[in-house]
Amino acid sequence: MEYLQIEKNASPYTVKYYLNDLETFNQFLMVEGIENLADVDYRLIRVFLTSLYDKKLSRRTVSRLISSMRSFYRFLEREDKVSSNPFLQVTLPKTTKPIPGFMYQEELGKLFEVNDMSDPLGQRNQALLETFYATGIRVSECQSLTLQDIDFTIGTMLIHGKGRKERYVPFGRFAEIALETYMNEGRNVLLKKSNVATNAVFLNAKGTPLTVRGMRLILTKMVEKASLTIHVHPHKLRHTFATHMLNEGADLRSVQELLGHESLSSTQIYTHVTKDHLKNVYMKAHPRANN
């Protein structure tokens, strides 16, 4: 845990999953009667994999478990607890990444029209929606936003991302107007309902920091008001941000940086969506696209 938290700078969620995976492997070793981690070989790992598939675990889960154990044995090698890493011989099962769902401009337009801008909660909801779409930040990142993180003079937010990594993300005029309206008016009204001082940007009806669950609920209610038949969650707005940016010509590296993705492969999933979009544009626009 110290290695993950201090040296790898892993998030609490990552540490939690690693420990869960280690416990799964430990339970397996106990059943097999293996007491020494150095006694684990390729044959035993194959038995371990079979036991995982017998539990009807998905390929994605199995892949994560193998990855966790590979990292664990790498750590054991470094600490001179084992002489080799048997998990290096195991091929990770191929996982199919689902193409992310996103919203069309028409659907988004309806969402932006449902909030009552004369009401403190309506101002908050509009600012929340504009922030999600303008920046593509994760819901946890939005929940942890403080007043000091927003710089209106240059139109950027300091985002505290996964693994304690920080990045600056710009926001546009619509988000600026919505945030200033809420922070100068609605937020002050909500703050008076609580005796607790807070720097959190988004507050609930009681004047205390809005939770991740609360943010999801707000979006669900907005969808109901807009009479939309789609399911909208914060991550769908993140997908929408990335897809729209690429559709309008943004390069992959820039979108990767804005999203806070560590590897480009995480961002590349959005190119599948944009390829479909480009194909539709081509088929409609090119004189010799159709017979």
Image (cartoon, helix red, strand yellow):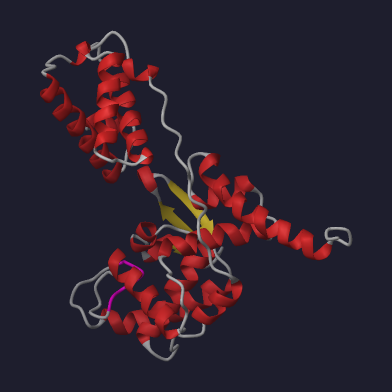
Q: Which residue is drawn at 61% across and 45% down?
A: 253
Of 162 and 151, which appears nearest the observer?
162
Q: Where is residue 51 in the image (x, y as percent from the top left)?
A: 24, 30
Q: Where is residue 73 in the image (x, y as percent from the top left)?
A: 29, 20
Residue farthest top in this picture: 83
Of 46 and 281, which appears nearest the observer?
46
Please check the rendered image and state whether residue 203 is part of the magenta-colored stretch, yes or no: yes
Q: In this view, does 282 lie to the left or right of 49?
A: right
Write down the region rendered in magenta: 199-204
Q: Residue at x 78, y 61 (%)?
A: 283
Q: Where is residue 113 in the image (x, y as percent from the top left)?
A: 51, 85
Q: Position of residue 269 (x, y in %)?
A: 55, 48
Using the image, determine if residue 6 lies above or below residue 70: below
Q: Is residue 93 left or right of residue 22?
A: right
Of 279 and 112, which appears nearest the observer?
279
Number of on-image labels: 0
Q: Quadrant of residue 29?
A: top left
Q: Which residue is drawn at 23% across and 79% down?
A: 206
**Image quarter in which the N terminus is found:** top left
The answer, for residue 107, to whether it is visible in the render is yes
